[in-house]
Image (cartoon, coloured by chain):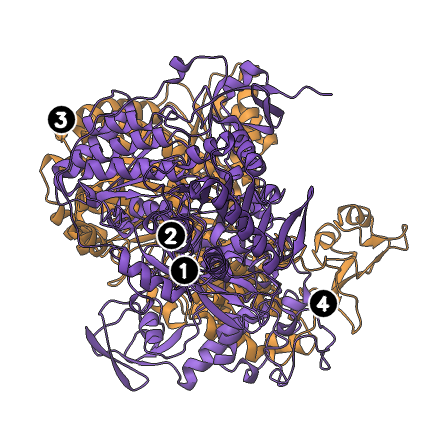
Amino acid sequence: MVKITVNDVEIEADAGRRLVEVIKEAGVRITNLCYIDGLEPYAGCRTCIVDIAGARPTTLQLSCTATVAEGMVVQTDTPEVKRARQGVMSLIMANHPDRCLTCHRRVHCQPGEICLRDDVVTHRCLTCSKNYRCELQTSTELIDMGEFEEPWVGETRSYYETPPPEPDRANPYLEFDPQMCIICTRCVRACADVRHTGAITLAGKGPSTAIAFGTGGPVHDSDCDFCGACIDVCPTATLMEKPNKWAGVPQDWSNSVCNGCAVGCTISYGTQTDGRPMIVRPDRLNAFSRDQICVRGRFGYDAVFERERLGRSLARRGERLLPVSFDEALDEAVAKLNAIKQAHGPEAIAVLGSPLATNEEAATLVRIAREVIGTPHIDFSHGATHRAVMSALAAGLGIAQQPAGTTQLPASLTDIETADTIIVVAGDLEESHQVAALRVKDAVIKRSARLVLVSTRWTELVPFATAWIQPEPGNEGVAVQALATGEGGGDAETKAAAALTRARDNAESAVAIVFAPNAVGAAEAGEAAKAVANLAIALRGDAAANVVHYLPTDANVVGIADMGVAPGLNGHDFAGIIEAARSGAIKALLVHDDNPLLNAPGAAAVRAAFEAVDALIVIDSLRSTTAELADVVLAESPFFAKDGTITTADRRIVRQKPASAATREERDGLVILSALATALAPSSDGSLGVADAASVMVGIAARVPGYVAYGDIRSGRTRALAPASAGATRTQPVVAMASMAQSGGDGLRLVTGRSLFTSWEGASIHSEEADKMHREESAVLHPADAEALGIRMGDAVVLADGATEVRITARLDNGVLQGTVYVPHYYDGGAIMALLPLEGSGPASATVRVRALQPA
Amino acid sequence: MGIPGDTYATLRANADAVWEEWNRPLRPRINLAEDTSSLAAGAHAVWVALNRRAEERGAAIDLGGTAGYGLQWLNPLADITWPDGTRILYGPVTLDAVDMLIDEAVGRTGAADRLAIGTLAGSRAGIASIEAHPFLAEERERRLTVRVGRTDPASLEHYIATGGYFATARALDRHMEPQAIRQVVIDAGLWGRGGAAFPAGVKWNFLAGAPGDEHVLVCNADEGDPGGWANRVLLEGDPHLIVEGMLIAALASNAHYGYIYIRSEYPLAVERMRAAIRDAEAAGILGNDVLGSGFRCTFEIVMGAGAYVCGDETGLISSLQDGRGMPRIKPPFPANAGVLLKPTNVNNVETYANVPLILMHGAEWYRQYGTQADSGTKIFSLSGNIERVGWMETPFGTPLKAVLAACGGVAGGGVLKAIQPGGPLIGYLPGRLVDTLTLERAPFAAQGAGLGSGGIVFIGAGSCSVDLNVLFAEFVELESCGRCTTCHGGNQRMHEIFRRTGDGLGRTEDRHNLELIASTLQFSNCAHGQLSPTIMRNTLRHFEAEYNAHLHGTCEALRCPGLARFRITDQSDPSLVEAQAICPTGAIVGEAGNRIVEDSACIRCGACTDVAPRAIVREAAPAGTELPRRAPAAPPGTASAFGVPPLSWQATGLARPEGGMGGPAPITLFV
């Protein structure tokens, strides 16, 4: 730490830091339109000029390139500094609309008012989407541009004298309006240096310098992933979210969490006066995601329009589901459940939870099942996969079960970006857990970490990898086991072995194994998990548990498992519940927030089960495909309106505060569950003590080790971890699944996975707009297979297994293994789930026949 | 491993034989000068004709190639070498002179004496030695360019036979310490010829002292200044000199890899340098075992992509790494983190070219010419409104007046209005200073200018300084890399102000705004932005009266589009037919006897007065004259924002300069 003086105030700062950051942290406002905190200075805008005493050749220096040194004396507001900044800013303003910025009446005008001063009314701050939240606007006010002469008015190519370039509004997420651009290149650097994507470039030179996506075409033709990191840094209205561009300034901000995947990036919802979230910004609370999110977090809340949500509860009247009051629906649901319980006993009722629910809702649902109804049959669609992985990891890594039945992996995801060697075992980490993939890239780019990638198809991580091993789908376990034992002789295996040997031999180097199995396929995931544990043991011996990062596919899988959403003693798991329902042993199903028709393999069996039961009670905010079959649907508020917590993959407890108030007759999930409990057991102590989310958490904290009451939670930092109880590690044998050659047949092995752009909610209501980009809604075939089948790029094809058929467009890509066909899980509301067998103990793979759809 | 001295001796013996054959050929040989300048003057067609005619006539002659000798207004140049060793330079050897030259070569009849410029070797009655030519009056001794125009630039043997690679071989043979080599260069007082004038030996000390052993050398051959082509003379005329200079620099600074970054507008230079590196590798002079010494050194040619700012060393390095050609923020400096973050030294072509001479002859010898502060000689490229356009190598300190006299003075005997030394960032000085300026750094610096890389453009009274400022402002604007708002924004505004002033729409507040631009542009990152207002500043200082006259509607030189127009004064002149045909915008309308120039269509290019000088005159435009029509401004981010191509040099009243304007251009545009 050294002492410097800023505007006559002495402050302490680390020597060598960029002066502009220190000035800003000291609370001094300064214009800096191109600097991004933490990145190397670009020094393009030249607006951060300050006076540094004794500097040469002039004391007026850029504070972004200057570094802090002992005794530095800095002035940010001398007349010379201001004049210099005004001169620079005037050149920026010459190519940007500035009528309002230099107008003496600007403080009196309101949006929508006709401008009395000037006839150019369409290019003003007051008609700009970024008005009142624009960094350029505040910067010009900071240095009193209104007082500065207007030197460049009327020059031939100044803003008002030239036709504006065309905006790009062709994609559903990002609007690119280059007429507002001041060429600060923050977006270029955010995309290249923060996200390692490089979709945005600086094109041209001199007067034709401009920002371009890819090679200068539409945004959606570039490599853009629509993460919006560029939107966060754009100082003008050049890059804006399309859905809410014109929504105005948020009235309030609400800390929340993205439920797009298990990373659990913290986000803030900017809300309007009517309580609707209108904008999402990353929230730095989660120490792992920090200021980065992906397209799901930024645009997921908007995937489903408000009018597509239920709003009112529904009850079946004959063939139709009709709106009824909440009380009527609740009474009907309670009557049905009580009738079945009385007639057939509590075990005739099964409960399905959801990884989209909060911990508080899950805990309450578990108590309803166990204490109020008294059934052991409770699970969620992907429960079997999660338990298979956890038991394999726990057994291998020597992790004891906590008293409440939970298993706690100690590794923190923040270790990934500081690792020297990273092994990623995933389908497509970039698509399933994008921010986790980002941190892997960070380690590769910034620390020259070596990445060994095990994935069945080409992903955006491949170019970052030292070695890419492409196993047969379902046999990831065998491939990882080969890494653990050092077998395999291919080129990639040799490179991988070299990297792993270096990691093993240098105990000081940091290792991270990122394991993100597909949600479907418990047996395969379990074997892969055993192999992952074996690999961790091979690399790090007894400390193996600290290097394994398990990323479930869905948001709160870890949390609801902690809460006990799992079959009780003699209880059926998900597949068992479905079988029992089909056979008539289970007569009522209570489903909270889940849509097994979308999520679970064996959709035909699931549908048959739902049709067989006497009572299907659904609690959801959407008229999902499951809700369509229900007898009673209790309307719940959307996820962003919920109060509660979720637990991320690395066990961070993240607090979610409601960003919206109920506008129609929907209720908070916890309120519904509480009312249901009260009505089901009027004789007991009433509402299970469920008053609000905070009090539920008190109960959880008392029961589940690691959880604490709200007052003690530092959202995104506090981790639900009990004191370590690591036992001895144990290497487990890995069983190979039937290889594609063994399983034979003339079809292709079907592979699925979570794709980046498709939203759960959109897919759940079978919306055609579920994937707004429509980039990934195709079956990916290897060109060699396609040629053999006579299929060309873009052909409509049929995937068939017996009578079940799925129609889809074909895409040819040699990134998939020959003999396989990849179809995204959420395509057409999970249509592909009908081609997979109901998940039991066996493998979940399927072989399908693919043929081109003949012209009619 | 071998002994460098022995390896060199073998190479030398072979080279001497080739050299002897070159100087005393068995039968007469015509050497045509092949460099970009002469190719632009039609040398290729001459070459084809020479070959065809020699074959058709069955003439007992050979044909060979050299580079031009520097007298470029006489292009294409050719020389004849007879078996007795006599060698005479001729020019301009146009297509109709081909037979004449073959006659002369075969018969020595004096058939081509009319085109004889001087003897390069031997003597001939009635033809003076080339050294006596008035254009070379200010040359003392050709040192850097001793081979240019005399040897075949593609021949490694010629280079070796004339002393090339001797200094390297000797240094390796005697195990000369790197430190000692650097000291000789420091003692010689060699400073960087690219414009910044930093002492070369000191710069090498930085590199030698940098950590690691992966030091990188870069040769900056991205010569982009309009009017500057000194580097091209060496690249095309003596490529091995540059290779050897870099090889010695590599020895001196423990570097094993070098890049030669050549602008893509110099395709011939690229070809010759590639060939030189290939030949040197084949001869064991480059590679893993330089001359058998065990020293390893490899050079690679990288072509530029047409950005002027890549002349800046960090911009060059960025471009060389396949990045966008943008000067970056310093520090770190290239000596610490250059190409691929390895310690790097960047020098100009001419800087490296001086090194073999210094190592061969010593610092003492080197300092024989030049002044105390500026030792040695320098290649200057001279163009503009002068009688004789070309390049010469003179000692530092030569009076500029004498150089102008050698160039035959201002074309047509007019007054010298201004000189523009060193490119569009360096300066623009009034012509009267020519009497006092000498070609060294200090006097130019005292005038707020510099020598730059050695291009000097002489500007005659027919040019207008406002009009020239439009040209220079457009150049610096187009060549801004786009990083600093001050530069890409400020130069747009500066260009607009001068263009508007030339259109007769200048405002009194423009002066204030130009000063605002000048003070704001200082806050740019690199020299391009910081120096781009230099010409404008010089104009306002030295040509204030002319600038102010424009604000009052007068362009004395009648160059500015809004203040001058063309009028037909003699309808009977038959050349009007050609003038009407040549007008690029069809502004001359009407039938014979009734032709007029349509002001709004006329772009004031002056092509018509070139072909019909007696029938069409420039005159001051009366108030209300229509301005040239221009396409409306295009949106930002699209090319050619004014919708019209940049004014040609012709329209400014200048002869076209060498070197081009930075953008890719076909080589036929050059003189």
Q: CA distance from mark 4 to mark 1?
A: 97 Å
The disc labelled 2 sits on which kind of residue?
Glu
Disc 4, SS: loop
Select label 2 or label 1 by which is in front.
1
The disc labelled 3 sits on which kind of residue?
Asp
Counting from the top left corner in percent of width and height, residue B666 is at 56, 40
The disc labelled 1 sits on which kind of residue?
Ser
Q: Using the image, name the chain to which the residue with label 2 belongs.
A: A
Q: Which residue is mark 2?
A: A371
Q: Which residue is mark 4?
A: B562
Q: Which residue is mark 1?
A: A684
Disc 1, SS: loop
Q: Which chain is purple?
A: A
Q: Which residue is mark 3?
A: B6
Counting from the top left corner in percent of width and height, residue B391 is at 43, 49
Disc 3, SS: helix
Q: Which chain is orange?
A: B
Q: CA distance from mark 3 to mark 4?
A: 71 Å
Contact? badges 4 and 1 (CB < 8 Å): no
Q: Using the image, name the chain to which the residue with label 1 belongs.
A: A
The disc labelled 4 sits on which kind of residue?
Gly
> Residue at image x 36%, y 25%?
B84
